[in-house]
Image (cartoon, rainbow, N blue to C red):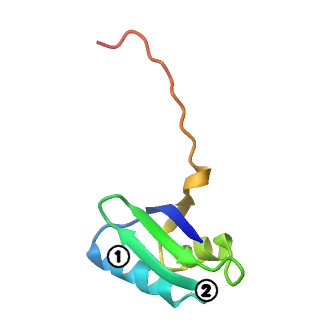
């Protein structure tokens, strides 16, 4: 399965390398790719070996916060009187 996560706490290329290494060490993860500019991680994994929650926990152990794209909601709020 492929999944994308927004990642909070990425500040530099070293952060990206550390997170990718941590994710690629997890049993069931085939490939993890982190993009510093977009603050996103794309991960390929086997659902029967590792759960989404275990991936989120792994990100947390590496010192970052993962937010599943399914947890992100878009709200449009009209604002009047701005010029």
Where's the C terminus, which quadrant?
Answer: top left
Residue at 67% x, 71% y is: 53
Q: Is residue 80 above or below residue 52?
A: above
| CB atoms of marks 1 and 2 within 8 Å | no
Question: Which residue was labeled with disc 2?
Answer: 28
Q: Which residue is mark 1?
A: 15
Specify the label residue 49 is tagged with: none
Which residue occupies the foreground of this view, 3 or 25?
A: 3
Q: Is residue 61 above or below residue 65?
A: below
In the image, residue 32 lies at what x, y percent?
A: 45, 77
Q: Is residue 72 left or right of residue 51?
A: left
Picture residue at 47% right of the left edge, 75% below the top: 63
How many numbered marks appear?
2
Relative to residue 40, is residue 49 drawn left or right? right
Look at 32% across and 65% down and name the residue there: 36
- Between the residue at mark 1 and the residue at mark 2, the CA separation in whole angstroms equals 22 Å
From the image, state whether disc 1 or disc 2 is nearer to you: 2
Left or right: 64 as drawn, with respect to 46: left
Name the secondary structure under disc 1.
Answer: helix
Q: Residue 69: x percent and y percent?
A: 55, 54
Mark 2, residues whose alpha carbon is within 10 Å: few (<14), some, or many (≥20)?
some
Residue at the limit of the structure toward the top, as seen here: 81
- In the rendered image, the quadrant that contains the N terminus is bottom right
Q: Which class describes the residues within 10 Å of circle 1: few (<14), some (14-19), or many (20+)?
A: some
Q: What residue is drawn where x is 44% and y is 61%?
A: 8
| Residue sitting at the far right | 48
Does label 1 or label 2 sit earlier along the sequence?
A: 1
Element under disc 2: loop
């Amino acid at each position: 399965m492929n999944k994308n996560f927004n990642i909070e706490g990425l500040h530099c290329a070293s952060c990206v390398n550390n997170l990718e290494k941590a994710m690629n060490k997890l049993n069931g993860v085939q490939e993890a790719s982190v993009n510093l500019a977009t603050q996103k991680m794309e991960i390929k994994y086997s659902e029967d070996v590792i759960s989404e929650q275990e991936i989120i926990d792994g990100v947390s152990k590496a010192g970052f916060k993962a937010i599943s794209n399914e947890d992100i909601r878009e709200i449009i709020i009209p604002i009047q009187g701005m010029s």
